[in-house]
Image (cartoon, rainbow, N blue to C red):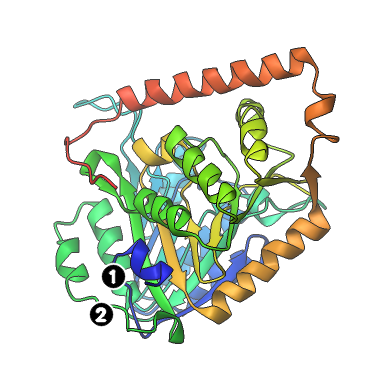
């Protein structure tokens, strides 16, 4: 039985997909897509900064609204808290439909734990970008600074119907996602003959954990190789156990993490996990050129996932997350080559000599307490996240 069948879930046929790295290329593509829109734009993003990049995208959205395109812009109220009232007014006065996702304080409730972490744009129900890239200068690169390392996937074809439905559902529409998914075409007998695309979403409050299940099954059923890129890597015991078992049965496990981070506590907490993973045979690399913000995985050169989901408790139980799973030799082969080049050119391998033997008692203690602190903070966030009590178990 193929890896894809063991991961399960339904996939779209008749789609096209390509990898897009963060930086100028991504934002040029984003602006071109907005300028090409004829009917509708759904843009959901965690951080929408009122800086040069944010202003550029805003002008493109205003142009689209001015030519009669229905524009729906949803940003997270916590992630985009830097938005000024003047910036909001500029958006809304031009006919753009604008909302904050779950303001932390409102007259009806206190919303703290549940955040909208999706990064997606869908144009005319025909083409989309899904990834981990927010709208801010640091993701584009400015003043000679390299952009944060991140990925997105550009998709066209019938999968965009499902992405539109998800955007409308998060916005507040009553459309039934199950009705869209019931019409998906099941994968062919030889799944790698065609490009197959699947939408996976997490929203624990609504009983959705498709991304978590997809990751777990891919790791559990890997036969040759696993490569993971994660900006905020703090997986639970279950995922760590699956990675260790994969290493011990001969699967080559590579994990690319950030040598630089915008959240130092998270980086120290991740380093606490190095010893156990390396002891089981996993290879760990730290990216050096800029902040690593990516969320990518490739298994056996056959299956890959790109999106907003981080391997940590927050993405599992607090945030709305959106990923695209893809099977296809050309796509996954190209992504694998990109990751191998990043390892070769831009990373430092973590080894007993370069890391473990040089860590003092105080540094080990710092990492331990960073790990325990992050675990506690994530559990506190989960306490403030409402749940409907339904959650699919893998």
Determine which residue is flagged by label 1.
10
Identified at 29% across, 65% down, the residue is: 9
Q: Which corner quadrant holds the N terminus?
A: bottom left
Count of picture labels: 2
Give me the residue at 32% from left, 83% from top: 188
| Residue 314 image offset from top left, x and y in percent | 42, 35
> Label 1 to label 2, Cα distance in Å?
7 Å
Mark 1 closeness class: few <14, some 14–19, many ≥20 residues within 10 Å: some
* Secondary structure category for the residue under label 2: loop
Residue 78 visible in the shown view? no
Image location (x, y in percent) of residue 299: 53, 62
Residue at the extreme front: 249
**Is 171 left or right of 56, judged from the image as shown?**
left
Going from the N terminus, do you reach mark 1 or mark 2 first?
1
Is residue 170 visible to us here? yes
Return the x and y of residue 237 as percentages of the image width and height.
46, 33
Residue 262 appears in which quarter of the rendering? top right
Q: Which mark is residue 185?
A: 2
In this orientation, which residue lies closer to the viewer: 263 or 236? Answer: 236
Residue 383 is left or right of residue 290, and the answer is left
Picture layout, residue 165 above or below residue 169: below
Closer-to-camera residue (303/207): 303
Q: Residue at x 80, y 54 (%)?
A: 346
Disc 2 crowd rating (10 Å Cα; few below 14, some 14-19, many 20+) is: few
Disc 1 is placed on an element classified as: loop
User: Residue 355: which quarter of the image?
Assistant: top right
Position of 250 with respect to 127 (left or right) is: right
Residues 279 and 76: in front is: 279
Q: Position of residue 86 (x, y in %)?
A: 47, 42
């Amino acid at each position: 039985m193929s890896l894809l069948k063991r991961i399960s879930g339904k996939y779209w046929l008749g789609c096209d997909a390509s990898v897009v790295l963060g930086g100028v290329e991504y934002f040029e593509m984003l602006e071109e897509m907005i300028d090409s829109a004829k009917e509708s734009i759904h843009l959901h993003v965690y951080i929408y900064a009122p800086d040069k990049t944010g202003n550029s995208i805003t002008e493109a959205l205003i142009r689209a609204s001015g030519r009669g395109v229905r524009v729906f812009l949803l940003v997270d109220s916590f992630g985009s808290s830097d938005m000024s009232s003047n910036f909001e007014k500029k958006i809304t006065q031009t006919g753009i439909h604008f909302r904050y996702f779950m303001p932390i304080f409102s007259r009806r409730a206190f919303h703290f734990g549940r955040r909208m972490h999706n990064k997606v744009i869908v144009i005319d129900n025909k083409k989309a970008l899904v990834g981990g890239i927010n709208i801010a200068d640091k993701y584009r690169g400015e003043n000679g600074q390299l952009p944060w390392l991140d990925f997105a996937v550009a998709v066209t074809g019938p999968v965009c119907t499902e992405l539109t439905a998800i955007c409308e559902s998060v916005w507040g529409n009553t459309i039934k996602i199950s009705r869209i998914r019931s019409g998906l075409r099941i994968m062919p007998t030889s799944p790698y003959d065609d490009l197959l695309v699947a939408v996976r979403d997490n929203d624990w409050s609504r009983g959705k954990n498709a991304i978590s299940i997809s990751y777990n099954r891919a790791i559990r059923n890997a036969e040759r190789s696993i490569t993971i890129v994660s900006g905020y890597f703090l997986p639970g015991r279950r995922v760590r156990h699956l990675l260790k078992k994969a290493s011990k049965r001969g699967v080559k496990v590579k994990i690319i993490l950030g040598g630089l981070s915008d959240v130092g506590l998270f980086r120290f907490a991740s380093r606490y996990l190095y010893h156990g993973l390396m002891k089981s045979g996993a290879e760990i690399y730290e990216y050096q050129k800029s902040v690593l913000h990516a969320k990518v995985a490739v298994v056996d050169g056959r299956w890959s996932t790109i999106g907003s989901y981080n391997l940590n408790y927050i993405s599992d139980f607090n945030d709305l997350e959106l990923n695209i799973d893809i099977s296809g030799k050309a796509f996954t082969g190209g992504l694998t080559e990109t990751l191998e080049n990043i390892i070769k050119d831009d990373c430092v391998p973590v080894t007993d000599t370069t890391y473990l033997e040089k860590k003092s008692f105080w540094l080990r203690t710092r990492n331990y307490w960073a790990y325990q602190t992050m675990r506690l903070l994530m559990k506190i966030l989960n306490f403030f996240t409402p749940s409907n009590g339904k959650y699919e178990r893998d």
